[in-house]
Amino acid sequence: MRLTGKILLITGAGSGIGRATALLAAREGAQVAVADLNMDAAEETVSLLPNGGLAMRVDVGQSADCARMVQEVVARYGRIDILCSNAGYGIQGDVVSTAEEDWDALFRVNVKGVFLCAKHVVPVMRRQGGGAIVNTASNIAIIGLRDRAAYVASKGAVDSLTRAMALDHVADGIRVNAVAPGPIGSPYFDRMIANAPDPAEFKRVLDSRCPMQRLGLPEEVAKVIVFLASDDASFVTGATYVVDGGGVVM
C-alpha cells in the first residue's frame, strides 16, 4: 500500500502499460484518474479499478484538453500527487520516408503531450508542496532502432525533458523520472504481429531480439512506475529506469 492517500493521474491508460499501472496503483492504495483518447477504453480501465476512479477523454496534444483534465481531477480529488505521462505511439520510417505531417503528429503526442501535462500539473503540485512525475520514454532512445526515426527521436526528447524537468522543479519538492521500456506485449505489438505475413514467425523474431527471449509484460513496467511514484524512490529524480529484459539483440 505504498500509494495510500495519493491521487494519481495517468494518460494513455486505456490499455497496455497505462492500464496495468492504473490497476497496480489502485491496488497500492491510490485514487486513480484515467485519461485516454479513447473514452470507452478509459471507462473500461476505471471499471476494473477496485475503488473506481475518474475516466476522461483527453487529447494530450491540446493544451485546453490538458488544462481541463487537471481541473477535473482537482475538482474531484482536491490535489494531484502523481502524474504518469504515458500516452504515445510509434510509426515506421526513416527521415526520408517519414512524411512531415506524420513527424509533427507523433511529436505532438509523444513530446508536446508530456510538456503540456506537466505544464498544467506542476503548478498544482507546487501549491501543495510537491509530487512525483513519471514519464514513459523507451529503451530505443538509448540504443536506437532502424526505420523508426520519428519515434526514436521523440522518446529521446522525453528522456532529455525528464532530466530538465527534474532540475527545474527539485526545489518545489517535485521528483521527475522516466521509465524506458523495451518491447512490451501490448495492443500495439498485438496489431503488428497480427498484420505480419507470418504472425508466428514474426512473434518468434520479436522474442529472439531480447536476451530474455520474450516480450515484457505491461505489469513488469507498471511495477517500476509505481516504485518511482512512491516514497520508496524519495532520493531518485532525473533518472531513466530501463525495463527491457537486457536490451535488444540486433
Image (tube, rainbow, N blue to C red):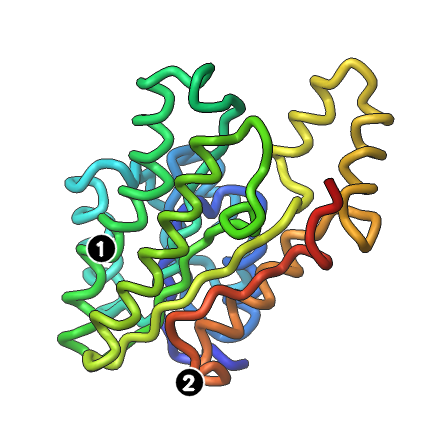
For this rendering, which residue is in front, 74 or 9? 9
Quadrant occupied by the C terminus: top right
Can residue 147 be seen? Answer: yes
Please state the horizontal and vertical placement of residue 181, each as a whole percent of the image: 58, 53
Q: Residues within 10 Å of mark 2 (few under 14, many from 20)?
A: few
Q: Secondary structure at mark 1?
A: helix
Please state the horizontal and vertical placement of residue 168, each as a whole percent of the image: 21, 70
Q: Which mark is residue 249?
A: none
For this rendering, which residue is in front, 178 or 39? 178
Q: Is residue 19 left or right of residue 195?
A: left
Q: Residues within 10 Å of mark 1 (few under 14, many from 20)?
A: many
Q: Is residue 171 above or below residue 225?
A: below
Q: Is residue 236 above or below residue 106?
A: below
In the picture, residue 173 is in which quadrant?
bottom left
Can residue 17 be seen? Answer: no
Residue depth check, mark 1 versus mark 2: number of the one nearer the observer: 2
For this rendering, which residue is in front, 12 or 169? 169
Provide the residue designation for mark 2: 234
For this rendering, which residue is in front, 213 or 13? 213
The number of discs equals: 2
Q: Secondary structure at mark 2?
A: loop
Q: Is residue 174 left or right of residue 207?
A: left
In the picture, residue 165 is in which quadrant?
bottom left
In the picture, residue 9 is in which quadrant?
bottom left
What kind of residue is marked 1?
Val
Q: What residue appears at the point 40 percent right and 35 percent down from the top-left corner?
A: 39
Q: Which mark is residue 70?
A: 1
Q: Is residue 162 left or right of residue 218?
A: left
Q: What residue appears at the point 32 percent right and 43 percent down from the top-left corner?
A: 111
Of label 1 and label 2, which has the lower sequence position?
A: 1
Please state the horizontal and vertical placement of residue 225, each as a whole percent of the image: 51, 65
